Image (spheres, grey):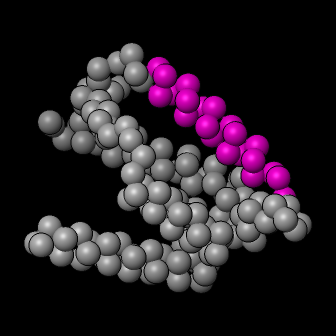
Amino acid sequence: MGMKDNTVRHLLALASGLLFGLGLLASGMTDPTKVQGFLDVGGAWDPSLALVMGAAVAIASLAFAWARHRKRTWLGDTIDWPQARGIDGRLLLGGALFGAGWGLAGFCPGPALVAMASGLQEAWIFGAAMLAGMAVHDLLLARNRES
């Protein structure tokens, strides 16, 4: 892979990240109070993020349907689809922890990174907690492999 290929990859990654971040900002996903208002179905529910999520799922579904018919990415890399199809305890626990963290903090990883870039203190706290959780996960995984 030449230097030109790396430049194209980096520019594409930058453009994708900027588009994603701008979309998160425009949709309100970086505002923890808006996210918590969406999750508060028993109280002052704010359904506006349902439209954001619906649009995201629709666009992603079209993109994945199109990609399923391809063997390579636009840049020529092989597309490796996940092989796991089942629902197990690890997936359920991970989903529950993700949902609890999202509901309590009003952040998930992508919007938290965008909010961190804007200097929001709560996002930095969330980011530190997320990194600590990842470190604990890796320690527990390594310990289980040794056993």
Helix, strand or loop: magenta stretch: helix
* Relative vertical location of residue 122 with respect to residue 58 in this rendering, above or below: below
* Relative vertical location of residue 31 with respect to residue 122 in this rendering, above or below: above
**Residue 47: within the magenta?**
yes
In the picture, measured across the screen, residue 57 lies left or right of residue 52, that is: left
Residue 28 location (% of width, % of height): 72, 59
In the picture, measured across the screen, residue 36 lies left or right of residue 68, that is: right
Residue 53 location (% of width, % of height): 67, 45
Span shown in magenta: 46-66
Residue under the image location 40 percent in, 21 percent down = 68
In the picture, measured across the screen, residue 81 lies left or right of residue 19, that is: left
Residue 72 shows in this picture: yes
The front one of 115 and 29 is 29
Residue 64 location (% of width, % of height): 47, 28
Residue under the image location 65 percent in, 64 percent down = 30
Residue 142 shows in this picture: no
